[in-house]
Image (cartoon, rainbow, N blue to C red):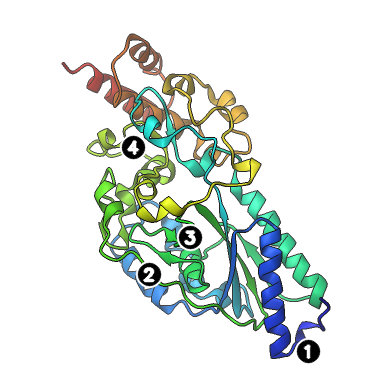
């Protein structure tokens, strides 16, 4: 296909280009590519209400940047369309989740973080897609995003026809469930847009019912302050004492709302080798992970999304998980060794775990 520069593209040629973009996206490993306009007024109001309730907790960055998050042209001038893509990440080779959650000596890590950090891979693929467009029509305005700026990726994906935002606040797709990453390209091309995704949650409340901490306080509303993913990843300080027993052996993220969503019976495993488990993170013991010093943590998790929480939060999370498990001599010994850890945060959670395990 050969097209004229963007200034000379007719309506028919723009339609042809949109179809080609979806084909190129599939060739680059995206399971679906959609296109939407930049009208996010409904999402803007929902975000404003969510922030007003304080559901974002310590994630102050969710309130930063004013309206740039919900008004794309304020973030990237001249943006009039958004290309939205999704890419499967569930690894077929990962140990069965149900097994992990019922074996308290093992660590549970959210499925998206078992392999390499997805940000770089998806950003590179999106850049390739943008370059392919540029090769066809010459220079045009664009910017690639993968969790790298204030972007309402799920409402955007919903408007682009990739699915709908479910009651657990994740994007759902009738043919693919929710085990996928999202990415975007903001563009200044007046491409034809796709139809908005239709909601198919119906009366189902499975995600709300199974949430260990009851973080889904109402349909489509998640109080991050109670969410295990927030508590183990985003929260910089102490995990609330009343919530610690509810974390079980989950030390980085939580997938329960996805695991029990009926639509995920249609989910597909990833074809990306980078998303397959590394360092045996899908079947490793809490004690082994707790024994990692900071340099070991950094070395073994090089290229992993987990690395960004730092060694201190890592130990904090594992101490809680150990406190939720059986009081073996090995566990008690490992906790005792950390009682003198230089971090007050780590020491607090170690003391809590020891106190719990000492109870009759």
- C-alpha separation, residue under disc 4 versus residue under disc 2: 37 Å
Instruction: Return the residue at label 1.
Output: 8
Of callouts 2 and 1, the N-terminal one: 1
Q: What element does badge 3 sit on?
A: loop
State whether residue 65 appears in this view.
no
Question: Within 10 Å of the Cα at label 4, are there few (<14), some (14-19), or many (20+) other Cα atoms?
Answer: some
Q: What element does badge 1 sit on?
A: helix
State whether residue 202 appears in this view.
yes
Question: Residue visible at 58% across and 28% down?
Answer: 279
Observer-nearest residue: 237 or 212? Answer: 212
- C-alpha separation, residue under disc 2 versus residue under disc 3: 13 Å
Question: Residue visible at 58% across and 77% down?
Answer: 73
Q: Residue 56, how many percent across, how many down? A: 36, 56
Tell me where residue 172 sits by quadrant.
Answer: bottom left
Q: Answer whether labels 2 and 1 touch (C-beta < 8 Å).
A: no
Instruction: Return the residue at label 2.
Output: 199
Nearer to us of marks 1 and 3 is 3
As drawn, the label of residue 238 is 4
């Amino acid at each position: 296909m050969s097209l004229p520069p963007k200034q000379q593209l007719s309506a028919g040629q723009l339609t042809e280009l949109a179809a080609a973009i979806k084909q190129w996206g599939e060739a680059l490993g995206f399971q679906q590519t959609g296109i939407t306009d930049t009208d996010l007024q409904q999402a803007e109001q929902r975000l404003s209400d969510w922030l007003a309730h304080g559901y974002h907790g310590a994630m102050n960055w969710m309130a930063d940047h004013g309206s740039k998050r919900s008004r794309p042209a304020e973030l990237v001038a001249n943006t009039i369309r958004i290309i939205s893509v999704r890419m499967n990440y569930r690894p077929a080779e990962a140990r069965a989740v149900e097994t992990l959650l019922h074996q308290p000596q093992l660590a549970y890590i959210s499925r998206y973080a078992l392999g390499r950090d997805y940000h770089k891979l998806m950003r590179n693929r999106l850049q390739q897609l943008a370059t392919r467009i540029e090769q066809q029509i010459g220079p045009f305005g664009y910017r690639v995003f993968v969790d790298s700026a204030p972007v309402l990726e799920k409402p955007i994906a919903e408007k682009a026809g990739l699915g709908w935002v479910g009651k657990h606040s994740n994007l759902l797709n009738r043919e693919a469930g929710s085990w996928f990453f999202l990415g975007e390209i903001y563009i200044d091309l007046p491409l034809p847009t796709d139809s908005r995704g239709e909601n198919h949650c119906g009366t189902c409340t499975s995600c709300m019912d199974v949430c260990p901490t009851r973080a889904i306080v109402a349909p489509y509303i998640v109080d991050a302050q109670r969410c295990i993913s927030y508590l183990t990843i985003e929260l910089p300080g102490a995990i609330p004492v009343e919530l610690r027993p509810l974390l079980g052996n989950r030390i980085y993220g939580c997938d329960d709302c996805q695991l029990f969503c009926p639509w995920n019976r249609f989910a597909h495993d990833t074809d990306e080798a980078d998303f397959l488990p590394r360092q045996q993170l899908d079947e490793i013991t809490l004690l082994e992970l707790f024994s990692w010093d900071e340099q070991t943590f950094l070395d073994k998790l090089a290229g992993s999304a987990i690395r960004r929480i730092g060694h201190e939060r890592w130990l904090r999370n594992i101490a809680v998980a150990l406190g939720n498990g059986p009081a073996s001599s090995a566990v008690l010994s490992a906790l005792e060794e950390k009682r003198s850890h230089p971090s007050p945060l780590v020491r607090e959670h170690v003391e809590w775990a020891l106190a719990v395990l000492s109870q009759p």
